[in-house]
Amino acid sequence: MRDYIESFLPLFVAINVPGILPMYLGLTETMTTAQRRRLTFLAVATATIIAVLILFAGQLVFSLLGITVNDLRVGGGLILLVLSISNLIFGDYRRRDPRQGEEDEEKADAAEVGVVPIGIPLIMGPAAITSILVSREAFGYLPTTVSLVLNMSLVLLTLAFAPLFGRYMPSALSRAVAKVASLFLAAISVALIRAGIVGMVAALPRKL
């Protein structure tokens, strides 16, 4: 039982469900209920697929692609930084394709935001990926798999009921929360980039 608890807690902290909630509300404040449901499903499904891939073939994938966790930190940080700046400056602006109908465009928006950045790297970011790799080595596949299932279930439940928090907010307060969430998202992205660069520099061979 101890292995399961010690496998669950680091991943729970790494995913940081309470920290995802305000960012989720900020990114989905203008979406309909149907869009949010689609986005939630896509986000959790994407994060789960990536997590399972990392659990069973993480080292192999990293070796084949020639990347490290630090590369993921920098790449994910850059994606979050661009998104947060876009949300802060342009607000609800969306690029519209005249060849797409409104319904197709709404589905495309939900899919894009659900996969990136909510699925990756907000839910399954570098910290969560590292936690899965470490847990697998320390406790084995079964405790890590159980931990992953429990954490993804918590994420799904939290995001599914997230609109209840926003429903009772005035629209002005909701927009303010969205802007503050984007600001924190920018700070998180900078922290990811910094951690990735520091890790890269630390990994460089030292010349005597």
Image (cartoon, rainbow, N blue to C red):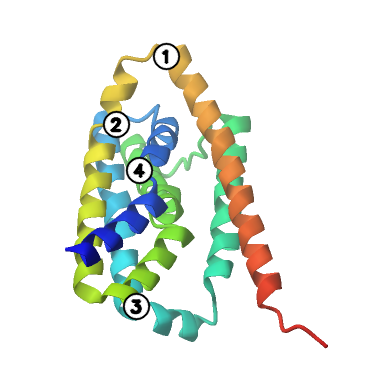
Distance from the alpha carbon under mark 1 to that under mark 4: 24 Å
Helix, strand, or loop for circle 2?
A: helix
Residue nearest the viewer, comparing 150 with 123: 150
User: Mark number for residue 17?
Assistant: 4
Q: Which residue is drawn at 40% across and 41% down?
A: 20
Q: Earlier in the sequence, mark 3 or mark 1?
A: 3
Q: In which quarter of the image is residue 161?
A: top left
Q: Is residue 115 visible?
A: no
Helix, strand, or loop for circle 1?
A: helix
Q: Name the residue under label 2.
A: 162
Relative to 56, say whether 95 is above or below: above
Q: Give the x, y percent position of residue 178.
A: 49, 27
Q: Which of marks 3 and 4 is nearer the N terminus?
A: 4
**Crowding near the residue tagged with mark 1, few <14, some 14–19, many ≥20 C-alpha atoms within 10 Å:** few
Report if the CB atoms under discs 3 and 1 are less than 8 Å apart: no
The C terminus is located in which quarter? bottom right
Q: Given the image, on which type of amino acid does mark 2 rest?
A: Ala
Taking the view exactly as shown, the residue that stands out farthest to the right is 208
Helix, strand, or loop for circle 4?
A: helix
Taking the view exactly as shown, the residue that stands out farthest to the front is 2
Q: Give the x, y percent position of residue 54.
A: 35, 72
Distance from the alpha carbon under mark 2 to that under mark 3: 34 Å
Distance from the alpha carbon under mark 3 to that under mark 4: 24 Å
Q: Mark 1 points at which residue?
A: 171
**Crowding near the residue tagged with mark 3, few <14, some 14–19, many ≥20 C-alpha atoms within 10 Å:** few
Distance from the alpha carbon under mark 3 to that under mark 1: 47 Å
